[in-house]
Amino acid sequence: MAKRQMKLTFPSEMITEPVVYNLGRDFRIVTNICRADIAGECGWVVLELEGSDEDIEQGLAWVTAKGVEVETVDGEL
């Protein structure tokens, strides 16, 4: 199983959507929230993702298609 740390930044219309939950349920990815913040009209979360490379790639493609900005987190949190 692969592990990746990613930062997801949500536009205002996505803040109340269960994106992290759906990512785990629909793509067989174990999600661990490392850090998060919601302020005003935007929010972000740093997630540790664990799953197969294929599932993680498909999940990140889905998140990006929904309008969420995705960045790789390098180093320790």
Image: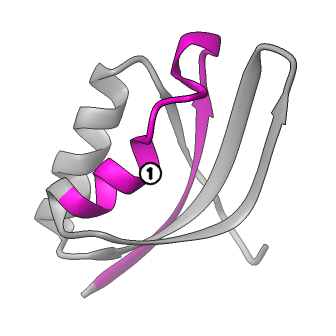
Q: Residue at x 41, y 41 (%)?
A: 19
Render colour scheme: one colour
Is residue 54 rendered to the left or right of residue 57? left
| Residue 32 image point, x, y percent | 54, 73
Asked which quadrant contains residue 53, the reply is: bottom left
Q: Is residue 66 magenta?
A: no
Name the spot of residue 44 as percent of width and height, x first.
69, 39
Q: Residue at x 33, y 21 (%)?
A: 66
Q: Secondary structure at mark 1?
A: helix
Q: Give the percent coordinates (x, y) of residue 52.
A: 17, 75
Q: Is residue 40 left or right of residue 15?
A: right
Q: Residue at x 75, y 78 (%)?
A: 76
User: Most extreme residue toward the left, as rendered?
Assistant: 54
Residue furthest to the right in view is: 39
Q: Is residue 23 above or below residue 11?
A: below
| Span colored in magenta | 2-25
Identity of the residue drawn at 72% across and 31% down:
43
**Quadrant of the frame with the N terminus:** bottom left
Location of residue 47 (image quadrant)? bottom right
Position of residue 5 measured from the top left corner of the image (x, y, whole percent) = 54, 65
Q: Residues within 10 Å of mark 1 (few under 14, many from 20)?
A: some
Q: Quadrant of the C terminus?
A: bottom right
**Image vertical order of residue 19 relative to residue 3, above or below:** above
Seen in the picture, residue 24 relative to 69 is either above or below; the reply is below
The residue that mark 1 highlights is: 20
Could you tell me the amino acid type at mark 1? Val
Q: Is residue 10 left or right of residue 63?
A: right
Q: Is residue 5 magenta?
A: yes
